[in-house]
Amino acid sequence: MESEQGGARERIMEAAIEVVAREGIESLTVRAIAQRAGVNVAAINYYFGSKERLVEAVLARTLENGLGGQLRELDACIEAERGDVRVALERFVRELLPDAVRYPRLSAAHLHDAIMRQDYSGQAVKAYRDFLEGFFRRVRLALPRGTEEEQRLSVAAFWSALHLVCLAPRLCEGFVPRGLHERAGAEPFARLLVQQLLGERPEPRRRPGRHRREKVPG
């Protein structure tokens, strides 16, 4: 019985996430969720109490999977690239973009109150700021020298550009390639963003060695 209840609750949650991701938070009606989850409308109130609490649960889970998952993914990239933050960041952005631009309505749902109401007191904004702090700690040593304020500003610029593309993939059509939903298309954009954040790639050091003398004819 408990497993059946857990299964129904999870189906409702997954259905709500899918509605938000594909149609936007404005389309998140009890009827649409119930139809997609294969339950009656009363089940939603039974498991979550109200639509508002279901929305809170959806945003909490997708925030953790999104922002928390991104930091874990960045850690994995840095480890895989043996601490090379530049290469790891390029890989991280290249892998992040395809899903993000495919489901922009999910990102918009997280920032709905901040964008539509200019309300920055919600859990999503706090989670986003915590995410920026976590990201800053991971890349700080690779940032160009400067004051902490300058470094933080460069991180804000990096994520502002990245999230604008995630929220509105076709806003800069004609300037941003349309193939961002594929890793190959995302690669040039990822490389440019990382270059703007970390500066030009340093020239490789020459190995010390003896200079060969040129033979003088004669």
Image (spheres, rainbow, N blue to C red):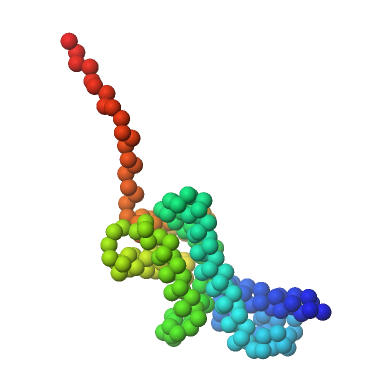
Number of residue marks: 0
Q: Residue at the far right: name it.
A: 1
Q: In the rendered view of the protein, which quadrant contains the N terminus?
A: bottom right
- Can residue 102 be seen in this snapshot? no
Residue 126, x across and y down, in percent: 46, 78
Vertical position of residue 109 compared to residue 142: above or below:
below
**Residue drawn at point x = 34 percent, y = 59 percent:** 143
Q: In the rendered view of the protein, which quadrant contains the C terminus?
A: top left
138, 13: nearer the viewer: 138
Q: Is residue 199 left or right of residue 63?
A: left
**Residue drawn at point x = 70 percent, y = 81 percent:** 34
Q: Residue at the far top: name it.
A: 218
56, 132: nearer the viewer: 132
- Quarter residue 212 falls in: top left
Q: Is residue 26 left or right of residue 132?
A: right
**Residue drawn at point x = 76 percent, y = 79 percent:** 5
- Quarter residue 12 falls in: bottom right
Q: Is residue 20 left or right of residue 15?
A: left
- Can residue 1 be seen in this snapshot? yes
Residue 23, x across and y down, in percent: 58, 75
Q: Is residue 115 left or right of residue 143?
A: right
Residue 210, x across and y down, in percent: 28, 27
100, 60: nearer the viewer: 60
Vertical position of residue 186 compared to residue 167: above or below:
above
**Residue drawn at point x = 60 percent, y = 78 percent:** 58
Vertical position of residue 109 compared to residue 91: above or below:
below
